[in-house]
Amino acid sequence: MRRTLIPLILAAGSLAGCNMAPRYVQPEAAAPLQWPQGAAYAPAEAGEAGLPWRALFADPRLQTVIERALANNRNLQASLANVALARAQYHVERSYQLPTLAGTASASATRGLKSSQGDSQSYDANIGASAFELDLFGRLRNQSREALETYLSTESGYRAARLTLVANAATAYITLASDRDLLSLAEQTRDSGRRSVELTQRLLKSGLAAAGDLAAAQTVLEQATSDVASQTTLVAQDRNALELLVGGPVEDALLPASLAELDTRIGQVPAGLSSDVLLRRPDVVEAEHQLKATYSQIGAARAAFFPTISLTSALGLASTALADLFTGGALGASGTASASLPILGGTNKGNLEYAKAQQEYYLAAYRAAVQSAFRDVADALARRGTITSQRTAQDRLVTAAQKSYDLADAQYRAGTDTYLNALVAQRSLYAYRQTRIATILADLTNRVTVYSAIGADDTLAEEKASGN
């Protein structure tokens, strides 16, 4: 008994019983295997899909902003804490599969109150396992596996949060650059409008212009002045949004100068030929781990219908004299086993039904995640396929509008035409220049959208593993 008790306990801890969980098979793809084709899409590109964010964003100031966001964003820190919680819970569930050995020691002394009563002492020391469950039907093993898949899902969720944060920080940075361009345009138009008002006032005094011309010139000036105030507010709000993502102040030296500068420093993310890359997207991986967890949940619920066998054992020493505690005659061992089996009532049936319903829910959620990911990429590629043509046309439109305004303004200043034509040309030029800025913004944000929609940036996982 002495030689075999502890080995038996350890062997019981590694006993592999039957597993009652259904076998997991990855669901069939819920989205087309290839990206969409048509008039809105550029020709498919061969090669691996995805791009690391540092390769996509070549601007060193933007890289610094993103690095700060990954290090200091409060929501991301909360997500990381959630990963730690899930990992700790997995360790707890895993510990139930192994016996817990505990050592105890005690001593007692009794003194007789009468002369006929003698004094007595007792000493004992024990080590053993208490109520260790033999996992013959895989209940504990499946509970541990469920906790592991939950932990892995939170890890994937954390990576998805990092991916989203990179995209949000870049988009906020680009939006700030766009609003600064719009502010600069509004200031230029305001200054031009002020000069037109001053000129019209001089012409009015000389009798060469009508009062209506002055009122018309003032509309352009006041519209641009109003836009300056509005854009000044937006620039301040954009900076606030960026600093919230970064988790702290962003100094002026790190702010974007213009969209034109970023246009040459933000690349294009390849989409590849196959949509299989979506199975690596963090939110899809997260949904799959959640689905896998339900298979183990079913296994644990099924195992609950079978007997639970527990083992209690002890190996120890006992003596009436401390000096004799470690002698051979003081050694003793004990062991007991118990089993329980549910017969009537209880929650086992309901728990199994719940686990199966959970499996159906997360299966649908996984398929929906794949379909949603496919649509994200398809929408982004549709925008990519047409944005270049739109930008080219918008550039030509601004060039033509600029020539039209220059001609109308020159004719008005020469007194050969009314101010109405110059006013219309100036308003059109202002609107077209605003639209061109919006088109460039759409192009740059689309590059970020393709990056996040594909989600194949393995460097985010590597950075986490390295402790960054």
Image (cartoon, rainbow, N blue to C red):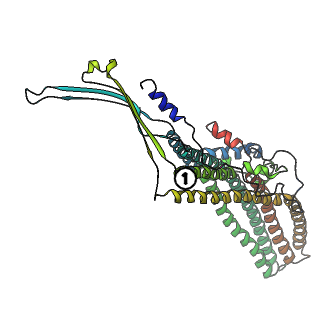
Task: Indicate yes or no whether the magenta region holds residue 173.
Answer: no
* Residue beneath disc 1: 301
Which residue shows up at 27% across the image and 26% down it?
123
Picture quadrant where residue 239 is located:
bottom right
Question: What is the x, y in percent for residue 228?
Answer: 69, 65
Tell me residue 347's x, y (percent).
Answer: 48, 58
- Image spot of residue 361 (x, y percent): 63, 60
Residue flagged by tag 1: what amino acid is it?
Ala
- Is residue 359 among the parts visible in the rendering? yes
Instruction: Identify the element where label 1 is drawn.
Output: helix
How many numbered marks does the figure carry?
1
Q: Nearer the viewer, residue 27 or 445?
A: 27
Image-based side of 164 in relation to 325, left or right = right
Q: Is residue 81 above or below residue 234?
A: above
Residue nearest the observer in this picture, 395 or 22: 22
**Rendered position, 456 above or below 229:** above
Residue found 73% across the figure and 52% down from its top: 452
Asked whether 352 or 363 is in front, the reply is: 352
Q: Residue at x 24, y 21 (%)?
A: 321
The residue range painted magenta reads 19-33
Residue 66 horizontal side relative to residue 258, left or right: left
Residue at 42% across, 26% down: 1
User: Does residue 29 belong to the magenta stretch?
Assistant: yes
Classify the position of the C terminus by image quarter. top right
Residue 250 seen: no
Query: Dot 1, crowdedness within 10 Å: few (<14), some or many (≥20)?
Result: many
Q: Quadrant of residue 180?
A: bottom right
Image x and y of residue 289, in percent: 64, 49
Instruction: Provide the major secondary structure of the magenta segment.
Output: loop
Would residue 69 be found to the left or right of residue 276 on screen? left
